[in-house]
């Protein structure tokens, strides 16, 4: 312990020549969990907790999921609760909506949310509106989940971000996790929620590992829907984003720190209902804000954040709110054009410096 106090973990790594020191370091290291395993474990635990929960979608069973999120669940829970479907999003989404009306808790997996366009009538007109149209007598406890936004090299019809689309709709709750903590806590909360939830994952993050502790790994761990997280504290500028863009904002904050800029990073987590309070309080502290998303700029999700900042804390601003978004163009297939069409860390840094007057 004295060695830890004297040198810190980094110092010990450099001096860990002996087996004893190597073992000591492993004892103090954080556990890590990939986003894929965080989602898989959350599904597993909720299936075990509530026999009304079941999963349906293309290749979720025999193939173990297109991205292996449902790995092992068919073998554990059987074909009645892990249901492979035909390639008909409108059909199986409608079945899921009806099952929710009847008191079950379906989880509908889309291989990509681009394919959910085939089922958008069921998501919005059936699931989102029925509680209101039934005067509160018919609830719809259903989760629609799958990868959203750009992946890599899948071009215009498989790369859209639907955050703004779904967060526009009354009756839906819309979640966009970033790390393993988000995925476990938010997915479990979504499955237990009485309302329809759109759960927007990111394919690129599935293999990314993040530190977790015993609390996050607990079977009853959930995160509150409607609450953002201050992922990194700062005092000079606020960087707001969701999903993969949280990681970009954290990288940008590290680079800005080298130039003496203290950036606060907000992980939105819940797109609807939006935690305006956390965002506004941060901007009141830093007096500057940059909002980042992969989606197109017009009517984008970040436009709502900018509007909120202007409405709630205009007098606290020292510079106009800024946005970094995807380019207003269908996603190109060529790798260099794809990179140019999406926000990059360097873009966040450039716009943050402009906002700071540097």
Image: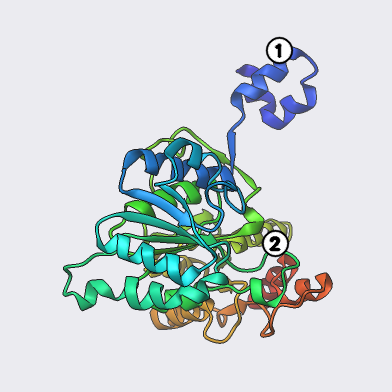
Q: Which residue is mark 1?
A: 20
Residue 67 point in image, percent of width and height:
62, 52
Looking at the image, can residue 74 be seen?
yes
Left of 27 or right of it: where is 139? left
Count the labels in the image: 2
Q: Nearest to the eye among marks 1 and 2: give it.
A: 1
Image location of residue 293, percent across then percent down: 59, 72
- Tell me: 63 left or right of 309: right
Question: In the depicted view, which residue is nearer to us: 184 or 319?
Answer: 184
Residue found 59% across the figure and 79% down from its top: 322
Per the image, label 2 sits on a secondary structure element best described as helix
Mark 2 sits on what residue?
256
Q: Earlier in the sequence, mark 1 or mark 2?
A: 1
**For the point 65% across and 24% down, which residue is it?**
26
Q: What quarter of the picture does the C terminus occupy?
A: bottom right
Image quadrant where residue 342 sits: bottom right
Give the image location of residue 350, x and y in percent.
72, 73
Residue at position x 62%, y 17% from top? 2
Residue 335, percent across and down?
81, 70
Q: In what quadrant of the picture does the N terminus appear? A: top right
Note whether 347 is above or below 74 in the view shown: below
Whether residues under marks 1 and 2 lie with C-beta atoms below 8 angstroms apart, the answer is: no
Q: Residues within 10 Å of mark 1 (few under 14, many from 20)?
A: few
Label 1 sits on a secondary structure element that is helix
Q: Nearer the viewer, residue 244 or 148?
A: 148
Residue 95: quadrant of the picture? bottom left
């Amino acid at each position: 312990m004295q060695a830890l106090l004297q040198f810190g973990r980094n110092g010990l790594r450099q001096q860990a020549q002996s087996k004893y020191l190597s073992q000591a370091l492993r004892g103090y290291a954080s556990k890590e969990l990939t986003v894929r395993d965080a989602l898989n474990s959350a599904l597993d635990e909720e299936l075990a907790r509530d026999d009304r929960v079941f999963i349906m979608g293309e290749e979720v069973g025999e193939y173990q999921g297109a991205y292996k999120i449902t790995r092992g669940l068919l073998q554990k829970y059987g074909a009645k609760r892990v249901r492979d479907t035909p390639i008909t999003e409108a059909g199986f989404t409608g079945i899921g909506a009806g099952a929710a009306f009847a008191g079950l808790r379906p989880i509908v997996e889309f291989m990509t949310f681009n394919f959910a366009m085939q089922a958008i009538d069921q998501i919005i007109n059936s699931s989102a509106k029925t509680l209101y149209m039934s005067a509160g007598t018919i609830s719809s406890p259903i989760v629609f989940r799958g990868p959203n936004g750009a992946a890599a090299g899948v071009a215009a019809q498989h790369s859209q971000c639907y955050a703004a689309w779904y967060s526009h709709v009354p009756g839906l709750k819309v979640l966009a996790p970033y790390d393993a903590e988000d995925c476990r806590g938010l997915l479990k909360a979504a499955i237990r929620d009485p309302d329809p939830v759109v759960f927007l994952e990111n394919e690129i993050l599935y293999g990314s590992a993040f530190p977790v502790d015993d609390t996050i790994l607990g079977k009853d761990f959930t995160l509150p829907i409607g609450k953002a997280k201050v992922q990194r504290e700062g005092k000079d500028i606020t960087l707001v984003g969701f999903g993969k863009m949280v990681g970009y904002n954290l990288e940008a904050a590290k680079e800005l720190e080298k130039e003496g800029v203290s950036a606060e990073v907000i992980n939105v987590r819940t797109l609807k209902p939006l935690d305006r309070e956390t965002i506004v309080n941060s901007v009141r502290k830093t007096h500057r804000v940059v909002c980042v998303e992969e989606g197109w700029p017009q009517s984008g999700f970040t436009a709502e954040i900018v509007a909120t900042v202007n409405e709630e804390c205009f007098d606290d601003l020292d510079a106009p709110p800024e946005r970094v978004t995807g380019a207003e163009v269908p996603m190109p297939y060529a790798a260099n054009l794809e990179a140019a069409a999406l926000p990059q860390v360097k873009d966040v840094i450039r716009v943050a410096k402009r906002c700071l007057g540097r």
